[in-house]
Image: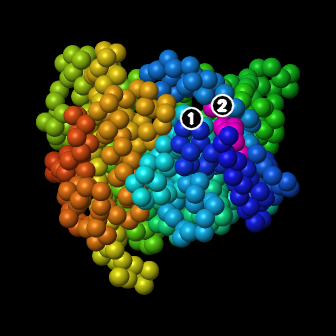
Amino acid sequence: MPAKPQVVIPGCGTVQGVQAELQPTVAKFLNIPYATVVERWRPAVKAAPWSGVRDCSVLGPACPQPANENPLANLTNNPKVAAALSSIQYSEEHCLNMNIYTPLEHLTKAQTLIPVMVWIHGGGLMSGSNALPLYDGTNFAARSIQLGRPIILVSINYRLNYLGFMSSRELIQDVHSSPGGTKTTVGNWGLLDQGMALEWVRDHIHNFGGNAADVTVFGESAGATSIGYHLLIPGHHGLFQRAIMQSGTPTTMAAGRAEIEGQRYFDHLCRHFQLDDDYVKKTSSEEKTLTAEEKMRRLRAIPATELVKAGDKGRVGMFTPTIDNVLISADVRDTIHDPTRYDPGLKAVMLGDCRDEGQAFMPTIGARSMKRWEKFVARYCPPTDEDRKEFESMYGVAKTDKEARRISAQVLTDAVFAYPNYAASVALMKTLQLQSPQHQQRQLEMVRFHFDRPLQLLDDMGLRTLGAYHGSELPYVFGSDASRLILSENEKALSQQMMDIWILFAWGETSRRYGLRHGLQSLLPKHALSQEAILFTETCAVERGLTERMDHQKVAFWQRYEQWVRQRRARQYAALAKQAQNKL
């Protein structure tokens, strides 16, 4: 009979978890609430204390989201995985919960506090959940015990899509009329949720044996991007000491303006639910339009599960955080290069990517045929003859649909992931040169990695051309039971090595200063400014190689591209401001 461990959390209540059946050294506490959404499009509040013993043996609800098949569902027909996916609940906005996986023995014996790892899932700020079988932390926690480096793994939910990241002029007006006024964020509620989860860990994880002063946050895609934003948000500094950013930095999903990028989503919702001015004029005998207040009132009354289905009726762009002058005050294409903006207490960063990231984005923004080629180039190449020649000298000239797909996939890999990783790592290392009191005697470890291994199963399915696409490393990092169903024996061995490296990073043992153990010394960068990286190769080997795969020509080009995008955005904002002024 599995044990049912209990933990008393002062200020919250008592939780009762469950001993993992196949990994009896691990205790699981699922669906612990850390915050509550009282009103849609408002900051959450701390979860109210509960009386009695709270059953934490079952996964909690996820944030409502558009239909989006989990990648594992496409790769395995295992009935257990299908059952786990179908059992996920989507319950309005009441999704702010966390799962905690901890060594069982650590709960029953007085020991020293151990490192904590907090997982922030990806999904384009549109979808995802800590309840996905892919992210089950049982095997990860069990491996840390076997390694002699036990950790506590925490995985969190946060608000997504229209519920967590929508902004518009109407939302600004609505929020600024609330008690918090202009000091309340607009469009960044999901980031606030994450911050509250990290605050909960800071305040309460010691009750599970975790060290709140030794927290590593790790995430992939939108999760990694979120971590990058937390590093730049002063109010969130000090909530973690180490970060692992897998395929994402702030410029991967650069914050937009509520009046421009955000407005598209709000207007899409209004059209979908027939609240837009054109529809109301046609159907109203008085040809009146709805006020901003009335639109907000009606949108709040729509069930969340219905609201997010509007995303299935046509995408109007990508959800991003918002420049709201509260959490985010400027274009991250500027701030990411400013070393004074980063958390001065950060001790270490591991930052990496997959070799063929761009393949995953081909259906939505790639040039799948020559018909889309010129439009694609116009988006990713500044409009000068010199830049066009430079672009073609680096990537080639597409003359066939096949060439258009190949080139655009590589361009997306470089523009969205490889260059942003380079820029973030350079800025982070510049923090070592700062002489302010907060940065005195600072030592920051920088570890880079590249993941090149395509899943063997893709080859078996005739999909090898996808390569090591976006998110390919996830089954290896967690090594969950669901993930192991799709991994070959060699891939399972690679998974164990990756788990070891992630765990040892959380223990501060990824540099020669600490003396990395367990046979991984040869993988270590020699020092913080080293150009060496950990390579997870196509043949399932783990080696040491060069950090950057972009030559100086590519770096210079994408720097010019970034500057061009900043200038283009500045012109858009200036035109919008002038238009608003003329209406006064």
* In contact (CB < 8 Å): disc 1 and disc 2: yes
Can residue 354 be seen in the rendering of this structure? Answer: no
Q: Which residue type carries mark 2?
A: Ile
Residue 471 versus residue 497 in the image, above or below: above
Quadrant of image for the N terminus: top right
The label on residue 378 is none
Question: Which span is picked out in magenta?
Answer: 56-67
On screen, residue 348 versus residue 120, left or right, reads left
Left or right, 399 with respect to 85, comes to left
Q: Position of residue 214 (x, y in %)?
A: 49, 67
Front in this rendered view, residue 406 or 295 = 406
Please tell me whether mark 2 sits on a helix, a strand or a loop: loop
Q: Counting other residues with Cα less than 10 Å from the Cα at mark 1, is it few (<14), some (14-19), or many (20 or more)? A: some
Q: Examine the residues drawn in magenta and state their main secondary structure.
A: loop
Residue depicted at x 35% and y 52%: 501
Please, which residue is most extreme toward the left here?
393
Q: Residues within 10 Å of mark 2 (few under 14, many from 20)?
A: some
Please, what secondary structure does the residue beneath circle 1 have?
loop
Mark-to-mark CA distance, 1 and 2: 8 Å
Q: How many numbered marks does the figure carry?
A: 2
N-terminal of the pair, mark 1 or mark 2, is 2
The residue that appears at 51% across and 64% down in the rendered structure is 114
Q: Position of residue 196 (x, y in %)?
A: 64, 58
Residue 559 included in the magenta stretch of the image: no
Q: Nearer the viewer, residue 318 or 350?
A: 350
Front one among 163 and 439? 439
Residue marked by disc 1: 132
Residue type at mark 1? Leu
Q: Seen from this angle, which residue lies furthest front? A: 1
- In the image, 482: left or right of 371? right
Which dot marks residue 88? Answer: 2
